[in-house]
Image: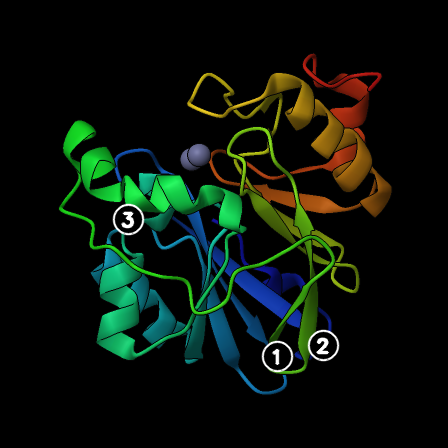
Amino acid sequence: MSDLQAAAPTPSGLHYRTVPVTAFAQNCSIVWCGDTRDAAIIDPGGDLDRLLAEVQRLGVQLKAIWLTHAHIDHAGGTAELAARLNLPIIGPHPGDQFWIDGLPQQSQMFGFPPAGHFTPTRWLADGDTVQIGRCTLNVRHCPGHTPGHVVFHSPQAQRVFVGDVLFAGSIGRTDFPQGNHAQLLSSIRERLWPMGDDTVFIPGHGPESTLGEERRFNPYVRGQ
Ligand SMILES: [Zn+2]
Ligand SMILES: [Zn+2]
């Protein structure tokens, strides 16, 4: 759990709350603009009733679904949530089309409720931006764990939502179809590190950390 709102000195700017969902304890983040209370939900993998209860408790207005990549624990609830609330689906990068197509098989394989198929309202590319209320986040394409993986970076809030690219003390798996270890390391080195050592990242699983901490101590990427 993480609640930037409690620590923030002012209500404007970007806020978020992370709620672990599914049997994989995937960190779904509800992010919102402090000025307008418009919210986006990053990676609604499942447990939609819990997520919607949290949205209601926070008193924010859900406007969009943002996806880092199309693995079942991140994207499994997308079709149903988009249909229930008529939300646009933003992302991931088109490299993950085959993972979206494979969601029904993924749900069967991992014992998830059947995941509906969806077509993103908007695909994302490196250098794009996404907007929620008055907050703008930068999109970086970070392939390696999946070919179409993207991350959402707020330079103002010094936060980046990295999905399964980087974890506290570890990195994403690359033993899936079209996974690529060397590419994952380049993504981390060339697209995450330049965001700065003080940037806090919210990974798809487990606790938050800073990029600087991982650059110094994470055995998988130390010295990269
Ligand atoms: Zn994944
Ligand atoms: Zn994951």
Question: Residue at position x 53%, y 82% from top?
Answer: 37
Q: Nearer the viewer, residue 85 or 88?
A: 88
Residue 136: which numbered mark, if any? Answer: none
Q: Which mark is residue 76?
A: 3
Q: Is residue 181 above or below residue 212?
A: above
The residue labelled by disc 2 is 10
Name which of mark 3 and mark 2 comes first in the sequence: 2
Q: Mark 2 or 1 closer to N-term?
A: 2
Lateral position of residue 98 relative to residue 128, left or right: left
- View quadrant of ligand 1: top left
Residue 100 sits above or below residue 145 on the image: below
Amino acid tagged 2: Thr
Q: Is residue 196 visible?
A: no
Residue visible at 85% across and 42% down in the picture: 194
Q: Position of residue 203 (x, y in %)?
A: 55, 39
Secondary structure of the residue carrying tag 1 is: loop
The residue positioned 46% from the left and 43% from the top of the image is 96
Mark 2 crowdedness (10 Å alpha carbons): few <14, some 14-19, many ≥20: few
The residue sitting at 36% across, 55% down in the picture is 44
Quadrant of residue 157 within the rendered picture: bottom right
> Mark 3 or mark 2, which is nearer to you?
3
Return the x and y of residue 21 as percentages of the image width and height: 32, 46
Mark 1 to mark 3 CA distance (whole Å): 28 Å
Are discs 2 and 1 less than 8 Å apart at CB?
A: yes
Q: How would you rate the neighbour count of disc 3 (Cα within 10 Å): few for under 14, some for 14-19, many for 20 or more?
A: many
Assess whether mark 2 and mark 3 are in contact (beta carbons under 8 angstroms).
Answer: no
- Give the foreground label among 1 and 3: 3
* Label number found at residue 34: 1
In the displayed structure, 118 sits above or below 196; it is below
Closer to the camera in the image, 112 or 199? 112
Q: Tag 1: residue type?
A: Gly
